[in-house]
Image (cartoon, grey):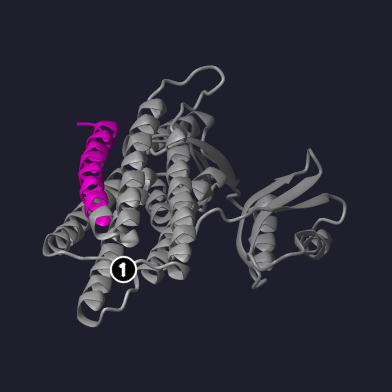
């Protein structure tokens, strides 16, 4: 069973479970005049709707790429997760309004033994469902499933709070139903806001995880002829499609044919092991005893001595073009990048007084 089939199967389990729980809770809540239990039932229905949206989004994301969308439709999954989060937020806001009304116009709920037993069963079921769906979401890199699973786990905690309220009512005849409903609503709203964060960040573009950066760097450095890996960038077009680029250092004595073969091997490795379509650029390391190698050592040493500079690479020297260029990666706390480039240019300029010096400001796109 492939990833999409697993997501759909898991979503159907969520739909069936939540619809059954919603029916039970609504029936008991109406009989016992408990707004908290009725709100729990409404929340279960929103969970079921979230699973439906997950299924629809998953199916739409399977559409093949076309001319207008050459990277496919994988990002539809992120929109699905956003819609689910909005539904949760809406349910939370509506529940909060109704609960506040209940605080000022309370009614006395009646809890039967049957009602309490079903509440306990609901807690156990939602815990199991939430754990299962969230675990599947993490395994399948599905924000929609993770959101649904997290919501179910929140529900189990919320329902447990309802059980506590029932116990207080039975022991001391104190009704906390409206207050508890308001607290439940706040938890739902908070969960909805948190659920929005992940898919929105994916659409905006997030930094590359440090573990993935380390793995890719180690893999590329293992290829014979590679003496450095820089400028790693990844763009996410859904869980199954990633486009990226990086630069490698090679000696300037390596023939173009060998460079071609090396970059081809790296791109094939990236597709086979990471499912990343990777473009590989090349930086040449000056070798031998010549003016280029001498300047490279001087420039790299001078720039690396600045504590605010994390990395120096991409040295280029051309007498034909009357140009010396080098890339730097400053610390994220450096705000005035233009001023830094100007200062460094003035520092390097005396080494080549008659040439143009260009300091290129790069950025770190990893964690």
Q: Residue at x 38, y 36 (%)?
A: 53
Q: Nearer the viewer, residue 312 or 176?
A: 176
Observer-nearest residue: 139 or 19? 19
Residue that appears at 35% across and 51% down = 43
For residue 298, say whether it is visible: yes
The region drawn magenta spans 1-29
Q: Which residue is mark 1?
A: 108
- On the picture, is 89 further left or further right than 204? left
Magenta region includes residue 120: no
Q: Is residue 248 left or right of residue 117?
A: right
- Report the predominant secondary structure element of the magenta stretch: helix
Decide which of 207, 178 is in the foreground and name it: 178
Q: Position of residue 16 (x, y in %)?
A: 21, 39
What element does badge 1 sit on? loop
**How many numbered callouts?**
1
Q: Is residue 227 visible?
A: no
User: Dot 1 surroundings within 10 Å: few (below 14), some, or many (20 or more)?
Assistant: some
Residue 268: image location, x then y, percent:
38, 32
Q: Is residue 267 left or right of residue 109?
A: right
Point out the residue furthest to the top here. Answer: 67
Above/below status of 129 relative to 48: below
Above or below 110: residue 139: above
Looking at the image, residue 253 sits to the left or right of residue 133; the answer is right
| Above/below status of 282 relative to 206 | above
Q: Quadrant of residue 262?
A: top left
- Which residue reaches farthest right? 354
Residue at the image position 24 percent from the left and 71 percent from the top: 166
Q: As drawn, which residue projects farthest toward the bottom? A: 172
Percent x, y for residue 10? 23, 40
Quadrant location of the N terminus in the rendered image: top left
């Amino acid at each position: 069973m492939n990833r999409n089939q697993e997501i759909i199967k898991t979503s159907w389990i969520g739909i069936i479970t939540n619809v059954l729980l919603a029916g039970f809770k609504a029936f008991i809540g109406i009989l016992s005049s408990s707004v908290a239990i009725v709100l729990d039932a409404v929340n279960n229905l929103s969970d079921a709707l979230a699973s439906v949206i997950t299924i629809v989004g998953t199916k739409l994301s399977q559409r093949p790429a076309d001319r207008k969308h050459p990277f496919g439709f994988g990002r539809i999954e992120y929109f699905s997760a956003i819609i689910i989060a909005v539904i949760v937020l809406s349910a939370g806001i509506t529940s909060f309004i109704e609960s506040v009304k209940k605080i000022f116009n309370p009614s006395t709920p009646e809890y039967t033994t049957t009602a309490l037993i079903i509440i306990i069963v609901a807690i156990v079921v939602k815990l199991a469902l939430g754990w299962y769906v969230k675990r599947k979401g993490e395994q399948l890199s599905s924000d929609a499933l993770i959101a649904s699973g997290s919501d179910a786990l929140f529900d189990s905690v919320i329902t447990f709070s309802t059980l506590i309220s029932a116990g207080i009512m039975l022991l001391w005849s104190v009704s906390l139903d409206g207050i508890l409903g308001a607290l439940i609503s706040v938890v739902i709203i908070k969960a909805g806001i948190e659920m929005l964060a992940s898919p929105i960040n994916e659409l905006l573009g997030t930094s590359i995880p440090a573990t993935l950066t380390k793995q890719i760097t180690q893999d590329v450095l293992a290829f014979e002829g590679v003496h450095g890996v820089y400028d790693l960038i990844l763009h996410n077009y859904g869980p199954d499609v990633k486009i990226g680029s990086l630069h490698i250092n090679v000696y300037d004595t390596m023939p173009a044919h060998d460079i071609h073969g090396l970059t081809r091997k790296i791109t094939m490795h990236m597709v086979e092991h990471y499912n990343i379509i990777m473009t590989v650029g090349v930086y040449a390391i000056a070798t031998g005893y010549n003016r280029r190698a001498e300047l490279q050592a001087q420039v790299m040493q001078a720039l690396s001595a600045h504590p605010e500079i994390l990395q120096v690479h991409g040295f280029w020297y051309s007498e034909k073009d009357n140009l010396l260029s080098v890339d730097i990666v400053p610390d994220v706390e450096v705000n005035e990048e233009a001023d830094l480039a100007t200062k460094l240019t003035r520092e390097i300029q005396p080494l080549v007084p008659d040439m143009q010096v260009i300091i290129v400001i790069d950025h770190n796109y990893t964690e």
